[in-house]
Image: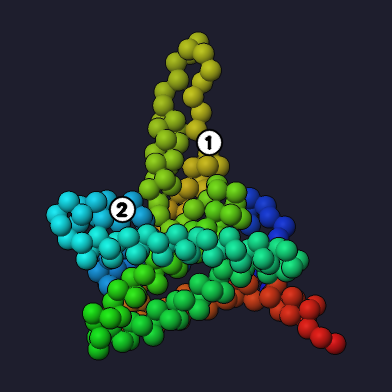
Amino acid sequence: MFKPIRGFTSLQRTPQTDLKLGSVLAFVAGAANAGGFLAVGQYTSHMTGVVSAVADHLVLGELTLALAGIGSVLAFLLGAMTTAWLVNWGMRLGLRSAYGLPLVLEAAALLVFGLFGAAIGFMTPVFLPLTVVLLCFIMGLQNAVITKISHSTIRTTHITGLVTDLGIELGKLLYVNRVGSGTPVQANRERLRVHGQLTACFFVGGLAGAMGFKHMGFISTLPLAAMLLLLVLRPALEDWQRLRPI
């Protein structure tokens, strides 16, 4: 029962397990990003737009909004840093769940997001900025997980790069090679499949997150948190059994 789940976050990696984990995390990122937009009116997964917005707000003299954007970028940065700390700490201790530690923290943060979200209606000026910062932290945390595990070959919280690479490979696929024109142009079909799958998972996750938030509200974060915990459950239990006092 746990064998396929265990492989998602195991220390022994293959391109196949990286893709499996990346697909799940892309789904979670899409769901959190889309649901988060309906909750706070802002996408929190891509820092390109946030940094551009900070520049716009500074030029327009909107210092409060500019500071809020800077806070979002710093939260994303802190999330990525936290992943590096947790994974390296887990590896130093020889934990089999080293790669899963950031996912445990992400699951907890998603639950906190649900709690903060329930309070937004009561104290919007206080909890709304905190919720945005928390979502940015979650996105930075998650993107760094799969980036570190896959050695920067897979990213999950934004799909600009994925769509770009997808377009490049599609261009190669549809390119008509002339006979005798030298080395033929060939598409990397495996790369095409990987990027297409990750993009599709992000999109489906976005649909699920938007529908979940629309019909269930902030409680829709519970299945996402449970999904992340399931990925790391088996290696975490093995570490606990191995390290607990006899």
Label 2 is placed on what type of residue? Val
Rendered view: 233 above or below 43: below
Check if mark 1's residue and mark 2's residue have beta carbons within 8 Å. no
Q: Position of residue 53 (x, y in %)?
A: 24, 55
Residue at figure coordinates x 48%, y 64% from the top left: 79
Alpha carbon separation for disc pair 1 and 2: 33 Å
Residue at figure coordinates x 36%, y 56% from the top left: 46
Residue at figure coordinates x 68%, y 55% from the top left: 13
Q: Position of residue 235 (x, y in %)?
A: 70, 72
The residue indicated by pointer 2 is 51
Query: Can you tell which of label 1 and label 2 is closer to the viewer?
Result: 2
Left/right placement of residue 69 relative to residue 191 reads: left
Can you say which quadrant of the picture contains the N terminus? bottom right
Residue at figure coordinates x 25%, y 86% from the top left: 123
The residue indicated by pointer 1 is 188
Label 1 is placed on what type of residue? Asn
- On the image, which quarter does residue 113 sit in? bottom left
- On the image, which quarter does residue 170 sit in? top left
Labels in figure, total: 2
Q: How is the image coloured?
A: rainbow
- Tell me the element at label 2: helix
Q: Position of residue 201 (x, y in %)?
A: 45, 59
Mark 1 surroundings: few (<14), some (14-19) or many (≥20) residues within 10 A: few
Q: Which mark is residue 129?
A: none
> Which residue is at the front of the view, 212 or 58?
58
Mark 2 surroundings: few (<14), some (14-19) or many (≥20) residues within 10 A: some
- Residue 215 appears in the figure: no
**Mark 1 or 2, nearer chain start:** 2
Left/right placement of residue 52 relative to residue 205 reads: left
Can you say which quadrant of the picture contains the C terminus? bottom right
Left/right placement of residue 194 relative to residue 11 reads: left
